[in-house]
Amino acid sequence: MKEYSADKIRNIALVGHSGAGKTQLTEAFLYLTKVTTRMGRPEEGNTVSDFDAEEHRRGISISSSVIPVEYEGHKLNFLDTPGYADLVGNVKSALTAAETALLVVDAVAGVEVGTELAWQMADELGLAKAVVLNKMDRDNANWKTVLGQLRESFPDARFVPLQVPIGQSATFNGVYRLISKTASMGAEGKAGDAPPDVLAEADDLREQLVEAAAEGDDALIMKFLDGEALTPDEIRHGLQEGAKAGKYVPVYFAAADSGIGIHALLHQIITAAPSPVDARPVAAERAGKPVELVADGSGPLAVRVFKTMADPYVGKLQYLRVVSGTLTADSKLWNANQGEEERIGPLYVVRGKEQMTVGRLVAGDVGAVAKLHHTHTFDTLTDKDGAVTLRAISLPQPLYAVALHPESQADGGKIGPSLQRLVEEDPTYRTEVNAHTHELTLSGMGEAHIDVAVRQLKDKFGVKVTTTVPKVPYMETITRTASAQYRHKKQTGGAGQFAEVHLRVEPAEQGAGFSYASQIVGGSISHSFIPSIEKGIRQVLPLGVIAACPVVDVKAIVFDGKEHPVDSKDIAFQIAGREAFKAAVRDAGPVLLEPVFDVSVIVPSAQMGDILSDMNTRRGMVQGTEQIGNKAVVNAQVPLAEIQRYATDLRSMTQGRGYFTAAFAHYARMPHGAAELVIAERSKDLVHHDD
């Protein structure tokens, strides 16, 4: 593939709801530009974009892929992203490599939850947006209805069609381009005549288009207000400027399956979508000071890694976006995030799984490099001298967790490195060993996201696991002061063991942890045995007293005891201290503490009542509600135990239109009734474990 300058490159992320036809559009682009000789189908597992075995099995995109297309002297890097809500991490990472988010909307189904999520992410990154209404040849396709839905769903945006569809449903046969006033007919995009009704519609829409173009440039708006006609070139310039500034959203029409509208779509993307040169500067830092980078091949080198593919046999392949400067093969770069030097070998332009070797990548282009040792997704590669660091990218927090249990000892030995590779591929996964429950947990965006990971562990890395709902990391504490004593006496024929400990436990402030003190006077216990008592107590702390949960926020004070001149020893006072502490805790009003999370639920306004009602059943404390456009936001504090499967429940309650965020807030005392159930369950587990 030839090299293109930054002004001849367009980076477009195809985003939207699952099933809207993003992958099919890439197949149409490749077929039209004669890269392929036939169009694949996602359901048949033969598309260029979806090449992973799991994608073939499911018939959907799971990971983002890069599909470069050469058209009319330009290179268009399409980033095909998953549409399923659980896979938003892949969408966000692909958007960081693009200037334009092209929202693919089903002309029958209209605006769906995936459309809304993609729009929100594109907004967060400040990208230009465009919409293509796909499947215009399907029964019940209605572009005016869907355009109305877009305007209702995103009231702050100005949607301006750049085309008028010629027919719809079975009669859809082309589009009329408003700028050039020409028709593009059939899959070949041949010139033709638009019918009178389309031309009449075009007159009204062209006025809106010219007005939008004029508002994109100060000089053009003056000319427009003076009543002068804008030339096609001026309209194109104004549209590009307006799209870059987010002043309007161009709308296109296509039918990817039949290829109708594809020629016009590619042509008008080149016309209206900003190039890397036109895009907003990218925020970065140099020596702690903010700088802004533009797509200049002679500028300071800054490369962002936006995706990692981990293969157990080939190694890592990392996808790059050259933000500034020129990246050359067989060079040395500095990883500004890790503080490590990386050796760059061959550079690739990738198309699906195909890798085409190139000598360099210029500013604004997208490519890949293999076998970097220290680099992770979203790291910045740069020159060591005058190194720049691109601003960090925030990803959504995981909302759904499972505990992983290897099926065999061999699986247990391989699970750590395999999970690390999964996290490298998709940073929205999180894995940890819980400090309280000692379970290995994997967190993701939802049930399907976790299911993908479990299958990849098996198929890609040969690791078999079973999953369970993670244990909630409860903790135990006390509510009042209590005292207890314990005498440990053991005689086995030889040297015996003797220790007697009197101690008191007192509640401490939340977060204080555990403290220990001695009030022994008169030498009832030798000074040398005081640490032995503490050692025994500390053995109890992680194991718990009433529910096998860690004990926190307790102060233990030893105030009396007895010892034997011969039989008293360290182990005896450890045992006595341990048992006295347990007895005192049982008399000190022990309670369970549970983790409580701050939860924000975003749903269509009409469903706010259902969410508030559901929160009450989950022991949630609603902190407030607010209205943002046609969405309602419910803020609440909810115990973790009640929201471990909320991602699935919310999707079911809202038909997929609701989503939420959750972050740890604090530990709170658990209500007596709920605590009793947990204690009974944990006691049962302990008995079973002892058996």
Image: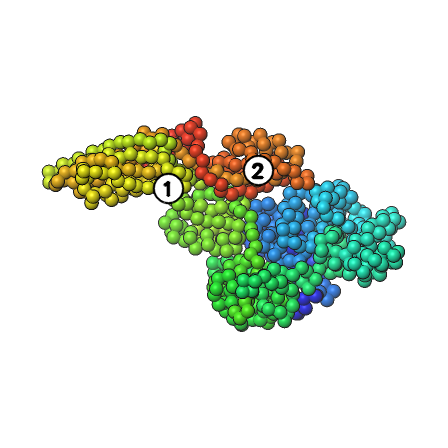
Instruction: Locate the N terminus and report the quarter of the image it occupies.
Output: bottom right
Q: Is mark 1 on a helix, strand or loop?
A: loop
Asked if residue 196 lies left or right of residue 108, the reply is right
Circle 2 packing at 10 Å, graded few (<14), some (14-19), many (20+), is many
Q: What distance separates the C-alpha of mark 1 from that of mark 2?
A: 30 Å
- Along the viewing direction, whichever of 449 and 512 lies nearer the viewer: 512
Badge 1 density bin: few <14, some 14–19, many ≥20, Cα 10 Å: few
Q: Please tell me which of labels 1 and 2 falls first in the chain.
A: 1
For residue 313, above or below residue 398: below
Q: Residue at x 71, y 53 (%)?
A: 246
In-front residue for pair 591/365: 591
Q: Name the residue under label 1.
A: 513
The mark lying in front, picked from 1 and 2, is 1
Residue beneath the point at 75% across and 48% down: 158
Is 368 on the left-hand or right-hand side of 228?
left
x and y percent of residue 173 in the render? Answer: 80, 51
Residue at 41% x, 45% y is 434
Residue 538: quarter of image: top left
Residue 645, given in percent of the width and then of the height, sits at 51, 38
Q: What residue type is labelled 2?
A: Asn
Residue on which the image places disc 2? 635
Numbered mark located on residue 13 in the image: none
| Residue plotted at (48% across, 49% down) | 430
| Quadrant in which residue 564 is drawn | top left
Q: Residue furthest top?
A: 673
Q: Tell me if label 1 and label 2 are in contact, CB under 8 Å.
A: no
Q: Position of residue 109 (x, y in %)?
A: 70, 42
